């Protein structure tokens, strides 16, 4: 199974327009465009009955309103402006052997991962890096 995000090369810096926060000309924080990156996948294995995607920082599920959990919309990266490390953000798509999980009400990404752990047929990830500290290299 493959995942494709055309907006940046796997392992490279996430462009500012896909982030929630950006380094401003003056000051420490500015809102960015917060554009949802286009995510595509292919090669789901035989027996796939459902696909869902999740990112590693807001538990956002790509294209799956049923799996929205506590947060159903996209917000891009927004690490602390004074953090001294480069942050890594993972977008992962899972091929599942079920169409729907037995999850109701509010739930987190960790709870969803635990619920579908035994239903994963395949998965694929795409990673990007981001920092809002101008002293931290972006790659």
Image (spheres, grey):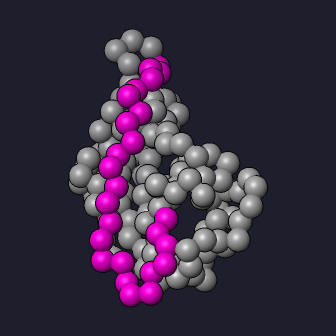
x 43%, y 66%: residue:
93
| Quarter-of-image position of residue 31 | top left
Q: Which of 83 and 12 is in front in this view?
A: 12
Q: Where is residue 50 in the image (x, y as percent from the top left)?
A: 49, 73
Please determine whether, in this image, residue 19 is positioned above or below residue 111: above
Q: Which residue is drawn at 56% across and 79% down?
A: 98
Please indicate whether residue 44 sits to the left or right of residue 58 in the image. left
List x then y, in percent, for residue 128.
35, 51
- Quadrant where the N terminus sits is bottom left
Residue 21 figure quarter: top left
Q: In this view, does 3 lie to the left or right of 123?
A: left
Give the image location of residue 75, x and y in percent: 49, 39
Location of residue 31 with respect to 8 vertically, above or below = above
Q: Of helix, strand and loop, which mostly describes the magenta segment?
A: loop
Residue 107 appears in the figure? yes
Where is 71 relative to 105, above or below?
above
Name the residue furthest bottom.
46
Query: Considering only vertical position in the picture, is 138 above or below 26?
Result: below
Magenta segment: 28-52
Q: Residue at x 34, y 15 (%)?
A: 25
Q: Locate residue 78, reporting x and y percent.
A: 49, 36
Taking depth in this image into account, of 18 and 64 the one nearest to the observer is 64
Is 92 within the magenta? no
């Amino acid at each position: 199974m493959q995942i494709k995000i055309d907006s940046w090369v796997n392992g490279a810096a996430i462009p500012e327009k896909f982030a929630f926060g950006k380094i401003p000309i003056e000051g420490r924080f500015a809102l960015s465009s917060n554009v949802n990156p286009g995510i595509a996948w292919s090669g789901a294995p035989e027996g796939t009955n459902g696909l869902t995607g999740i990112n590693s920082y807001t538990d956002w599920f790509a294209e799956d309103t049923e799996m929205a959990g506590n947060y159903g919309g996209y917000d891009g990266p927004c690490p602390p402006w004074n953090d001294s490390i480069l942050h890594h953000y993972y977008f992962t798509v899972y091929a599942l052997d079920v169409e729907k999980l037995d999850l109701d009400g509010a739930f987190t990404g960790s709870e969803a991962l635990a619920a579908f752990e035994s239903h994963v047929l395949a998965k694929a990830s795409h990673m990007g890096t981001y920092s809002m500290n101008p002293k931290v290299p972006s790659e």
